[in-house]
Amino acid sequence: MMRVIMVSHIPLPGNPVRGGVEAVTLGLLKGFSQCDGIQVKVLSFSHDRDLTVQLYDNVEVCYVKKKFRVRKMELWLHARKYLERIFKEWKADIIHIEGNGSSLLLLQRELASRTIVTQHGILDRERKNTSSLRRKMNLWAAQMIERHKWPLLKNIIFISDYNKNLCKGIDHLKWAQIYNPVDDDYFTHKDNGGRGFYFIGRLNERKGVRDLFRAVASMPEDVSLDVVGGPDVKEYMTELEEIVSSLPAGHIKMHGWQSGERIRSIVEGDCCLVLPSYQETLPVVIAEAMAMGKIVIATDVGGIREMVEDGQTGFLFKAGDVDVLKELMTKVMALPQDKLCWMRDRAKALAFKRYYSETIANNTNQFYLEVLENERG
């Protein structure tokens, strides 16, 4: 029986999913629930209380109460020791850390050969695409931690060609490229055939949300946009709210952060995800949209070009080009029904082939076995 400790932040029961890493972790755990020969204990740090939840028969989640207000201190002074203790007590085979940057504070030399890190973000690219000084400083500090800890890293999972090709100094690493998984429930989603649009994610500059709002503001009132997510910077959110308040009611509908079940309900009348980001690695919202049979309008940046087939499962455009974004949204509104159905069916078929959670879980488990075999010589 393979015993795996996974470290990732996931929401407490009943709380909404905030961001791609949380969604990816939950999708992977769903996949592991369908796999034989593996037990997973998830450590989720920085919560307001200690709580243990049996998520599936073979998956247990331990929510660990925060000891320090600053996340980096929490990881270095508390989480690192907690992880080491659980690894020994539970007699685990593998440690799997979902996330890079500050998360690498958890790396320990004596456990490095059995530790795997999934790299989700490209920190220097994220730093270049934010104007918030505080955010820039946090990302810079995370980069310094990553640079310092990198020599200790032995095993890594890349989620796209994009981040693998950007990563330097991997000759000493054992690596695998494994896509982000999608929760099975997205594949069973049914909608009402509407032509609405939606966006899911953090409301910040990197995601290009201002561009999307400006495009929608210049379109007819019958164009609807559902927005799921929350802000990083208060000033940016204020600007978005000013745009929304100037428009007719229902033109842009703000829903805040929501659970996966609630998201699928919100987008029932939408046929298209719009993601106008300036930088992405492999956004899980695109994989989720494809699994639901939605087409995608997105910028041709980062790993997005690995996901969206231009003209077949969606449309790509240059980041920042609001006029072309508006043209593409208008084009989707006017697509013949048979063409739209063909694109949606193709998107769903590709999502099942690439992102189905049980397939991704089996690929990940296989990498665990390879890491163990490599560690044992």
Image (spheres, helix red, strand yellow):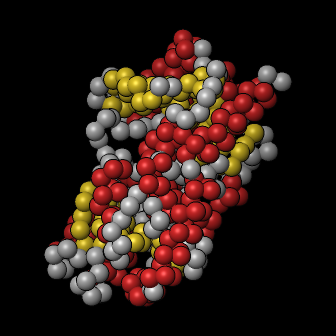
Report the number of numbered marks: 0
Q: Is residue 154 left or right of residue 90?
A: right
- Relative to 253, say whether 95 is above or below: above
**Is residue 143 among the parts visible in the rendering?**
no
Which residue is at 54% across, 11% downward? 89
Question: 226 or 266, which lies in front?
Answer: 266
Residue 253, compared with residue 126, is above or below; it is below
**Between 330 and 177, the one nearer to me in the picture:** 330
Name the spot of residue 360 as percent of width and height, x first.
61, 45
User: Does residue 286 sit above or below 313 in this rendering?
Assistant: above
- Residue appearing at x 50%, y 50% in the figure: 182
Q: Quadrant of residue 311?
A: bottom right
Determine the image quadrant of residue 70.
top left
Residue 228 % position (x, y)? 31, 60
Query: Which residue is at 30% across, 87% downward?
Result: 219
| Vertical placement of residue 234 versus 10, above or below | below
| Residue 327 horizontal/vertical position (percent) | 43, 88
Quadrant of the rendering where the N terminus is positioned: top right
